[in-house]
Amino acid sequence: MSSFADLPMAPAPARSLRGDLLELLSSMRFAISLLTVICVASAIGTVVRQGEPASNYVEQFGPFWAEVYGALGLYRIYSSPWFLLILAFLVTSTSLCIARNAPRILVDFRNHKEGIREQALNAFHHRSEGALAMPLAQAQARVQQLLSSTGWSIKSQVRTGGAGKAAGVMIAARLGAANKLGYIAAHSAIVLVCVGGLFDGDLIVKVQAWAQNLQPFKGGQATDQSRLSVNNPAYRAQLFVAEGQRSNSAVLNLDKGMLLQPLPFEVELKKFNVDYYATGMPKRFASDIVIHDPRTNTTQTATVEVNHPVVYDGVSIFQSSFEDGGSQVSLKPVFLSGKGLGTSPAVIHGVVNGDALPLASDAQGQVKVEITGLRVINVENLSEAQSGGEDKTDVRGVNLADLSKHLGSGAKPPGDKTLVNVGPSVTYKLRDAAGQAREYQNYMVPVNLHGQAMFLLGVRETPSSNFRFLRVPADENNSMDGWLRLRQALGDEAMRGEAVRRFSLHGAPPDRPELAAQLGVSAQRALDLFAGAIESPRAQGEPAPTQPPGGLQSLSDFIEKVVPEAERERTSETLVRILNGALAELMNLSREKAGLPALSMELDSSRAFMTQSVLSMSDAFLYPVPVVLMLDGFEQRQASVFQVTRTPGRNVVYLGCFLLIVGVFAMLYIRERRLWVWLHSDDAGGTQFRMALSATRHTLDTDAEFERLKTAVLTLDTRA
C-alpha cells in the first residue's frame, strides 16, 4: 500500500511577473516601508537647511561632502526626483491597498453574520446560557427591543428546523461598525495628502519646464525661455516690490536657477510698516498694498501681515520678509591714519544694491565700493557691556601675545539678555580689480560698551563668517576725531619725539638726569615699535613677519627676542607703563595742536578713553584697508518680499487631514463588537437562549459590557 509521500504533487500555479508586481505594490508592508523612507527623508530635510547658497554648504560640510550631498539632492529634498518618485509609489501602493481591501470591508460592514451556526457560539470567550419564562415570539421581541434601545444594529434569522437543524431564531447584533471605515478613511487620507503635496510642490513646474524646454536663468533679465504661463495651475514664488512701485513678475527658485512666474495682476506697495517693542525688537510687519487687475480695470487695497495673507483670484499673498528697496545713502571716507583730519572729504552718494562706485586705485587696479545693506534699527544684546561687576580693562594687564579678544564681536550674547537699539548701520563691499571682495559693516553712532562709547567697524572675509569689529573710542564730542588725532600724531616722528621728551621730563626725578635719559630711550623705542616705525630684530635667516609692524604685537615680539624668559613678565609690565605714559603725552600734544585743553589722567573717563585707544590703535594695524566709510546720511526706502502661491491641492490636503483624524480616532477609540443571541422554545412553553460576544480588542470594558448584557437578558422575564 503506497503512502501519501509517494503520490506525485500537483505543480504550483504559475504566477506572472505582472501579478507579482501587483502583489508587491498592493501589500501593506511595502507601503509602510515607503512611508518610513519618506519620514527619514523629511527628517533630513528638517536638519539640513534647504535652498541655501552653495558656498554655505561648502563651508559647513567641506568641498567633498558638499558635492556628494548635492548630488543626492539633500539641499532641495522635497523637490528632488527620487523623493517625488517615492511619493508617487506610496500613492500607488496605498491606492492599491484600498482597492483590494475596501470591497471586502464594505461587504463585512453590511454583514451581521446572522447565519452563524448555534453550536459555534460555544467557541467564544464571552458566552452564556439561560432560560426565559416567556414564549419564543415574546422573547424575540424583548431581546430585539433591549438591543435596539442600547444602539445595537440588529438582524434576525428565523430557522424552521429540519435536516438535522434545530428550530429557533438567531439574532445578530453589531456595534462600532465605524471601526472598519476608519481603515478606509486613514489610508485614503495618506493618498489625498500625498496627491495634494505633489500638486502643490515643484512637480507641475518641472513637468512644464521639461515639456516646454524652459531654461532657468541665474541673473540678469529673464527671456521668454525662462517664463512660465500666467495660467500656471500651481506655483510657490517670491515677489519683490519696493515702496512706490508695482510688479507682477514673481520668481521661482529651482536647483538650477530661477523661472519667471507672471501674475494675472500687479501688486503695488504703498507703505511697509514695522512696529517695535520698547527694546527696539520688531513686533509687527505689515505691507499696505494695492492690487491692480488689468482684466477688469479695478483696484483693491489690502494689508498683508505675517500669518494674515491676502487672497485674490485664487492667489495667496503672504508677507515673507522685507529688504532694502534702494535706499539713498551718503558715505564719508575716514582714513584710520588720521589723514585729512579737519578737512571735508568728498562724500560718496550711492544706492543700496545699486551700481558699484569707484573708490580708489591700488597697485592691482581700481577698487570699487558696493553698498549692500542699510539697517536703520539694530537690536543687540549688550548685557555683558551693562554688567557692573566686571573690572575695567587696564592696559598694564594686557597679554601682548593674544589680540583675538580685542577683534571679537562687538556685542557678545552670554548671560542675561539686555536688548538695546544701537542705531543705524551700513554694509558695503570693497572689490578689487581681481574681483576679490571683503564685506564691511559700520555703525553710524557710537555704542556704549562697558561704560565707554565706541564706534564699531566690522569686517569679514566671507558671507558665512561673523563680523569682527574694530572698536574705536568716541571722544567727549561723540566723534572719532580724538582717536584720529592721536593716530595721526603717532605717525609723526617729530611729535613722537616731543611726546618722549615731555614724558621723560615729567617721569624722572629732577635730581636724577641719567634716569630721564634712560626713560627717554625706553619711551622712544616703545613708541617707535608701537607706531611701526621700527621692526623687532630678526635672527639670521629668520623669515619676515606675516603681519604689518606696529601695535602691541610688535612690543611682544621685541620682548620675546631680546629679554630672557625669566624677566619677560616684569619687563612687559614696565614697557607697557612707559608706552601708556608716552601715549598720554602724545594725546595731549595732539589736542594742544588742535587748540583743545589737555586731558587730565586723574579722571576715570580720560583713563578709559586712553585704555581703549591703546587697544584699538593696536588692532588698527590689522585692519585690512586704510579707510572706512562712515554713514553720513540716508533716505530709507523699504521693499517687501511676498510669497505668492496658487495651491489647488490645498483643499485636498485639508480633506486628507480631516479624514486622517477621523480614521485614526475610529480605529483607536471605536471598538467593533458583535453579539449573537440564539432563542428556541423548550418543552414547558418557555424559551431557552444562548448568547456570545465577539470584540476586536479584549479589554476590561468588554468583560463589563458582556456582564451587563447577560444580566439584562436574564431579567427580561421579570420586567413588566
Image: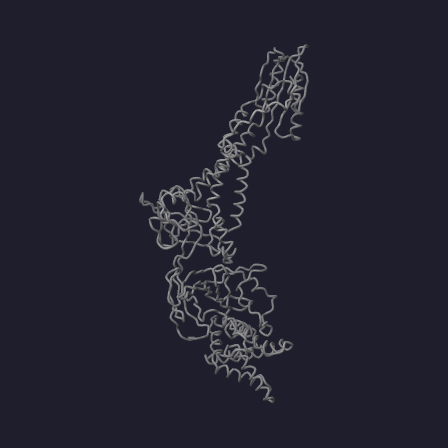
Q: Can you say which quadrant of the picture contains the C terminus?
A: top right
Q: Is residue 528 above or below residue 626?
A: below
Q: Is residue 714 above or below residue 407?
A: above
Of 180 and 604, which appears nearest the observer?
180
Task: Locate residue 700 relative to residue 297 in the image: left or right.
Answer: right
The reply to whether residue 310 is in sight is no
Quadrant housing residue 429: bottom left
Task: Locate residue 356 relative to residue 464 in the image: left or right.
Answer: left
Residue occupying image coordinates x 58% and y 31% = 670
Residue occupying image coordinates x 58% and y 14% = 158
- Counting from the top left corner in percent of width and height, residue 202 is at 43, 44
Picture mark count: 0
Of 361 and 459, which appears nearest the observer?
361
The reply to whether residue 631 is in sight is yes
Q: Is residue 132 above or below residue 409?
A: above
How are the colours assigned in the image?
Answer: one colour
- Counting from the top left corner in percent of width and height, residue 261 is at 37, 47
Quadrant housing residue 412: bottom right
- Counting from the top left corner in percent of width and height, residue 668 is at 59, 34
Q: Can you say which quadrant of the picture contains the N terminus?
A: top right
Quadrant housing residue 8: top right
- Counting from the top left corner in percent of width and height, residue 498 is at 50, 84
Q: Is residue 563 above or below residue 213?
A: below
